[in-house]
Amino acid sequence: MNFIKTLVILLLLIIAAIYGLLFTPQGNSLLKPIIEDEISKKVSIPVKLDTFMLNIENFKIVLTMNDKSYIAAKGSLNILAQSLKVFYDIKIDELSNLKKLIGKKLNGSLNTNGTIKGDRYIIHIDGKTNFANSDTLYHIELKDYEPQNIKTTIKHMQIDRLLYTINQPIYTNGTADIKADIKSLELEKLDGYVISKISDSTLNPEPFKNEFNISIPSDITINVDINTKLKNTKAISNINVSSTINNLSSKVFTYDLKKNSIKADYSLEIPNLDKLYFFTNKHLQGDITITGNVKRAEDLMHLTGHTDTLGGAIDFTLKNKTLKVNIKNIQTIALTDMLLYPHIFDSIANAKIDYDVNSKKGTLHAELYDGQILPNELSFLIKQFTNFDITKEIYEHTVLDTNIDNKLLHSNLHMKSRYTEISTKDAMIDLEKETIDTKLNINIKKSIIPVILTGSLTKPSIKIESDELIKKRAIKEIEKKLPEEIKNSPLKNLIKNLF
């Protein structure tokens, strides 16, 4: 766009400056080296003005660069009507040579040709180009040399070639088709529409690793449909993104160009959570759908989300660096299924999480209701030692408080039933290593059983500190076998003290 605008202004300035004075062959010869020298100052390669012909009605210019690139223009002029009609043909073999002229580094080549028609008030440019290996038609109207109306149809543009051309990492390939009709580019009076479609785009893992330190699979494909309406200062879009991992949509995505702000709704659907392993570094099971809204302004990032999942609901709010999560009535069995952990405890859980995204620190407070310990290795061992089936107990109210430090969780737990009470202080869980290290104090009918849990979260090592328990059991067995006269004598306490 800037290149065409620069070309048009350059042509008009050249013509306006010399038209009435130097339209003879002798005048052309005098002016030719001057123009050639001025253009050479604006590009980084040798240029040659092979043809420069200007007379009272017509002109022709052929400028070559580095033997492989050229700019050719010819047409007619009407000095009285201050109008022109130009046919142009441009071939740039390496756009990086025009960095000084354009103001930024571009790569690759460009071919374009078309016509320029108009006068000092309005100019119409119609052309076609193979930009980024596309088949593109464009119509541009300039008023006072500023673009006011743009129509374009871009077919089969190669996204990897586009990224290469604008000097960006090649994040993806695929093709893009764009149709635009913009009646006004004035910021306060934007008017028009843009329809964009990206098809069969495959993400390239290498730049994601280099730029963001994220390892992604090599088989993620994406399709995108965006319909945008321009109105006043805003671009209002309907967006649909589908990929092999998720589906993301926004019915009304509003970007205010003047305020540089975003306001949008969104719906995110992930049919298979295990496909997020490259991001979570943990295998997951199930699916999830999240809906919410996002706002972004100069000093504000505000994201909300809601999902009905795990038999209950989860709501969250991210405001700048502060994340708050509210969990209601989820089923702990459904949660352990999602995390691919064994079933240990069946209950309904409510929880609140406060978390600082920057420091990666926060707190979790959870309350679980009507819980029941499910048969597992720990319950089996307790029954072996005490002849008490802990899985028959109902824990009406369980409280869990956790301090979060990145991927380390330090927790206090308290749960109580009719005959038992279970507690732990400063239990440590490492989410990165998926390990646990804690000591449970299990009180069964006023007999305390210390239990050490260490190792893998999915299958921890269980050690019951049984010395005291064995001692009590031995005393009880001896008491059963004592004669009645000893049971009722001081000798009974003496025997206990032996242990």
Image (tube, rainbow, N blue to C red):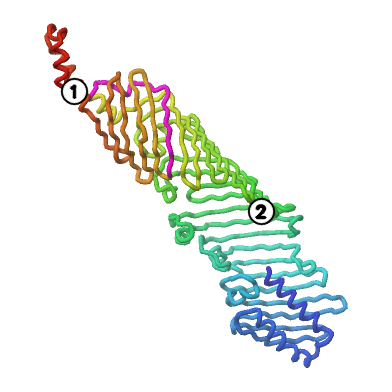
Quadrant of image for the C terminus: top left
Q: In the rendered image, which residue does mark 2 sit on?
A: 260
Task: Describe residue 162's horizontal placement relative to residue 32 as left or right.
Answer: left
Residue type (three-letter) at the residue carrying disc 2? Asn
Q: In which quarter of the image is residue 19?
A: bottom right
Mark positioned earlier in the residue sequence (1 or 2)? 2
Query: For the residues carrying marks 1 and 2, which lies nearer the camera in this image?
Result: 1
In the image, is residue 41 part of the stretch drawn in magenta? no
Where are the magenta residues, as a range? 385-405
User: Which one is in front, 318 or 239?
Assistant: 318
Residue 315, above or below 45: above
Secondary structure under tag 1 reads helix
Q: Note whether 394 is above or below 187 in the view shown.
A: above
Q: How crowded is mark 2: few (under 14 residues within 10 Å), some or many (20 or more)?
A: few
The picture quadrant where one finds residue 391 is: top left
Which residue is at 37% across, 35% downward? 426
Give the residue drawn at x 69%, y 72%. Answer: 4
Q: What element carries label 2?
A: loop
Q: Residue furthest bottom?
A: 26
Q: How many residues crowd mark 1 within 10 Å: few (<14), some (14–19), many (20+)?
A: few
Is residue 273 visible to us here?
A: yes
Residue 471 disc label: 1
**Left or right relative to 499: residue 87:** right
Q: Quadrant of the N terminus?
A: bottom right
Residue 319, how many percent across, how many down? 57, 43
Spot occupied by residue 300 in the image (x, y as percentages of width and height): 61, 47
- The residue depicted at 30 percent of the width and 19 percent of the height is 446
Could you tell me residue 343's position as x and y percent?
35, 32
Tag 1: residue type? Answer: Lys
Is 375 above or below relative to 142? above
Mark 1 → mark 2, Cα distance in angstroms:
74 Å
Q: Residue 368 carries which label?
A: none
